Amino acid sequence: MSAESSNLSNIEHCAVMKYFVKKGKTPKEIFEDMVSVLQESAPSYTMVKKWARLFQQGRESCEDDPRPGHPVTVVTEENVRKIEKLVLADRRIKLWQIAEELQINKERVGEIIHEHMNMRKISARWVPKNANAV
């Protein structure tokens, strides 16, 4: 795997962990292998241990389990587009401001920005995660 392809989604991380568990690797070996290839974008050791345990217990799916009180309907293409438009118009916008504007839970706004738009905050500005800090 090359450095250019090191930005994997959570589901892709999960699939890699599932593969290694099926090969009989320990969570420590899986974590070290993923860090050596993915560097900063590798999942945490805690996350690797969690998923390895689930797969060892027979779990097959890499999808998150639905959680009560967290409607999946908030993460829609329309909301992603609306949030993207707000962030691109004002890179310093706060999560609570977006949440208030769109009437969406602040945690869901953060999830959309981090997971679906692949952005993070640097020096109070939203930037793509793969952008180098200036």
Image: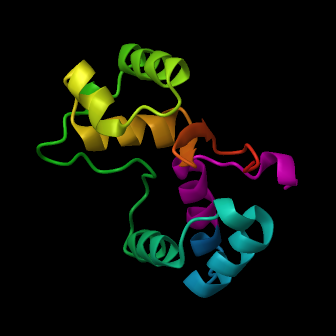
Look at the image and tell me in which quarter the N terminus lies.
bottom right
In reply to whether residue 9 is colored magenta, the answer given is: yes
What is the span of residues highlighted in magenta in the rendered image? 1-19
Give the side of residue 47 with respect to residue 98, left or right: right
Q: Position of residue 117 (x, y in %)?
A: 54, 32
Going by the picture, which residue comes out furthest to the right?
2
> Which of 57/76 is in front?
76
Q: Is residue 24 left or right of residue 96?
A: right
Residue at (37, 37) in percent of width and height:
94
Quarter of image, res 76: top left
Q: Position of residue 14 (x, y in %)?
A: 54, 58
* In the rendered image, the vertical position of residue 102 relative to residue 34, given as above or below: above
Q: How is the image coloured?
A: rainbow
Tell which of 18 and 32 is nearer to you. 32
Residue 125, above or below 24? above
Location of residue 21 (image quadrant): bottom right
